[in-house]
Image (tube, rainbow, N blue to C red):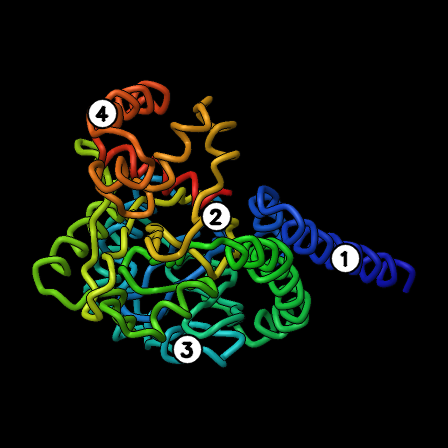
Amino acid sequence: MLLGNEVILSLNEQVLAVIESLYDAAMDETLWPLALKKLTDFTGSQAATFWVLDGSDRPRLPTFTYINLDPAFVQEYLDRVAHLDPTVQYLVGHPDQPIVHDGLVITEREKDRHAYYDWHARYSDLRFRLVGQVCPAPAVHAGVALHRTRKVGRYEPPDIEVFTTLYSHLARALTIGFQLGSLGTMQQCTAELLDRNPAAIILLDERQRVVYTNRRADALFSEGDGIRLSADGIGVSHRHDNERLQRLIAQAAQVAVTVTTSPGGVLRIPRPSGKRSYTALVTPVSRKYPALSTLRPVVCVVITDPDARHILSTGRLQAAFALTEAEARMAVLLAAGEDLRSTAANLGITYGTARVRLAEIFQKTETRRQGELIKVLLTTLALV
């Protein structure tokens, strides 16, 4: 009887150790491999993964942490095969199903005839899977998958029952992780900073869909003066300008793939009202996101209205680039969409003087062309 108590005590200690590791990983995402190791050991599994799944269109796994899997196998899975995985397809189609195992997804006979499992068998002898997932936002899934080999065998009802006991803690840990990531304080503070910006700021994901607009952007779209917003992204009224805008966005979105050209750029956007054109900066965004994050922008579009004065602070430009007050005033007008001649007229100087001053600004901002200068200035605008 005493031995039985010792076994029960040991089992309880293992459960507590697994649960503790899940909460530790939620607080520090670098600890997920350790949590996965404890899960595999406790559940008699041979491999495990922690992942975030974007199931909105073609399923993708932007976050994928794993143990006991070959890196080359994982990379090919992520790059070419994940969207064909029947379990991934089942998760996308059943976001409210907290625990998923092979018996819900596919029969063993169907596995033998399925192209995904044929590919899988060439790299790994893993055969069975048990998944726990949560869906913190529409089309966003996060969870853990446990894997067993054919030799060890499938996850039977007692295994699933044990995992069900752990699932409530897994779900709570993932929820905490999202709150500490983009859905909590970090995203709230970022939104507040962007909303205070006088320029319209639009963030796009890698499919060029709008994932965030600040208050000025919302107001600009509501004016309906040459810029439109839809489920497919951002567009402008004139076909030629819209084609150029989409090229700049696509170029910026591919910066992680190729850096052979300068990503993004600046363009003018004519307004049907006849008011002076908007100036738009398109630039890539750093892709270093928290693992548990639903906001994953890759492109930032900053739009300024030349009729909205004091877009840029001359004092901040002076501090950022060591400009003189006169050079900073010129830079503000150029960033607002003025050409060099109208800028000279507004400042009460000759065109020749304006060119000399522009050359000084080029040198201090380490730019060579007016378009490149405007891009640097508007990038500064997005950060101040």
Q: Secondary structure at mark 1?
A: helix
How far is mark 1 from mark 3, CA to CA? 28 Å
Q: Is residue 223 above or below residue 287?
A: below
Work out which quarter of the rendered image holds the N terminus and state it: bottom right
Q: Amino acid at mark 4?
A: Arg
Residue bearing the label numbered 1: 16
State which mark lies toward you, 2 or 4: 4
Q: Position of residue 218 (x, y in %)?
A: 41, 69
Label 1 crowd bin: few (<14), some (14–19), many (20+), radius 10 Å: few
| Dot 2 or dot 1, earlier in sequence | 1
Q: Which residue is mark 3?
A: 103
Residue in front for this viewpoint, 96 or 106: 96
Taking the spot 49% from the left edge, 63% from the top edge, the residue there is: 142
User: Mark 1 belongs to which amino acid?
Assistant: Leu
Disc 3 on helix, strand or loop? Answer: helix
Q: Secondary structure at mark 4?
A: helix
